[in-house]
């Protein structure tokens, strides 16, 4: 069951949900809270690498780090996302979620109608999460999009679980992105488990 605005406010006041800094009143919808764009981005460099092997953890770590660079903006700066380009961004707000809730991140329809995708797969926010949320931006339109720090970029809603999670994100061994303060590159190679499930007969 999704929390209403009344329940979200009560959870924030009780310290169960953390949104820091707290958005102004006009950012609260009937069952969600708008989140805004931070100042830090990651984009792909042009590198001479033939491919990235998604089953090779060493390759992912070494090449992934080398392929992306971080960009930090000032308040008055803009980040330009060109057609067909992908970039990582981050919420201005730090979000903390208790063990018995799951968060859902949605992009704004008004921005999607201009070609901006805010998340590609990272739609859910695990119980026990604490940190800034990474956006996976993609410009599906035909014009460059200027992204400003502080722009209302999406909304987060919260849903109750039937019981507290046995393995909340913050208590998992090797929680790769917990407490992140910048948009991190992929930590796929640090999953702590084989990247391939194996083949028949093994």
Image: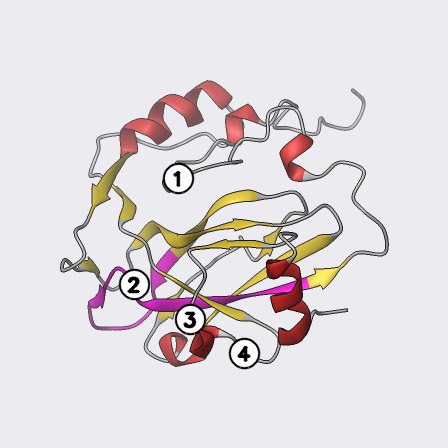
> Earlier along the polypeptide chain: callout 4 or callout 1?
4
Residue sitting nearer the eye, 78 or 200: 78
Residue 181's disc is 1
Give the residue at mark 3.
Answer: 24
Residue sitting nearer the eye, 157 or 116: 157
Q: Which residues are magenta?
A: 137-158
> Earlier along the polypeptide chain: callout 1 or callout 2?
2
| Numbered disc 2: secondary structure | loop
> Earlier along the polypeptide chain: callout 2 or callout 4?
4
Q: CA distance from mark 4 to mark 1?
A: 26 Å
The residue depicted at 65 percent of the width and 38 percent of the height is: 169
| Residue 141 x/y as whole percent | 29, 72
Q: CA distance from mark 1 to mark 2?
A: 16 Å
Q: Bin the neighbour count of mark 2 within 10 Å (Cα to Cα): few under 14, some 14-19, many 20 and up.
A: some
75 to the left or right of 140? left
The residue depicted at 42 percent of the width and 56 percent of the height is: 21
> Earlier along the polypeptide chain: callout 1 or callout 3?
3
Q: Are marks 4 and 1 in contact (CB under 8 Å)?
A: no
| Residue 167 x/y as whole percent | 75, 36
| Numbered disc 4: secondary structure | loop
Give the residue at mark 2.
Answer: 150
Q: For the C terminus, give its image quadrant.
A: top right
The residue depicted at 61 percent of the width and 28 percent of the height is: 195
Q: Is residue 89 above or below residue 24?
A: above
Give the residue at mark 4.
Answer: 29
Q: CA distance from mark 1 to mark 3?
A: 22 Å
């Amino acid at each position: 069951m999704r929390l209403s605005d009344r329940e979200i406010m009560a959870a924030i006041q009780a310290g169960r949900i953390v949104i820091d800094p707290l958005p102004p009143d006009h950012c609260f919808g009937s069952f969600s809270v708008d989140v805004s764009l931070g100042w830090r981005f990651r984009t792909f460099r042009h590198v001479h690498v033939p491919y990235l092997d998604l089953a090779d953890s060493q390759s992912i770590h070494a090449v992934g780090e080398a392929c992306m660079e971080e960009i930090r903006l000032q308040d008055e700066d803009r980040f330009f996302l060109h057609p067909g380009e992908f970039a990582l961004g981050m919420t201005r707000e730090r979000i903390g979620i208790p063990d018995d809730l799951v968060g859902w991140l949605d992009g704004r329809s008004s921005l999607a109608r201009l070609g901006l995708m805010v998340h590609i797969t990272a739609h859910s926010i695990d119980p026990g999460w604490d940190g800034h949320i990474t956006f996976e931006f993609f410009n599906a339109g035909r014009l460059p999009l200027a992204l400003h720090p502080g722009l209302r970029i999406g909304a987060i809603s919260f849903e109750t679980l039937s019981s507290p999670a046995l393995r909340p994100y913050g208590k998992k061994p090797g929680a790769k992105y917990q407490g992140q303060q910048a948009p991190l590159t992929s930590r796929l190679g640090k999953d702590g488990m084989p990247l391939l499930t194996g083949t028949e007969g093994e």
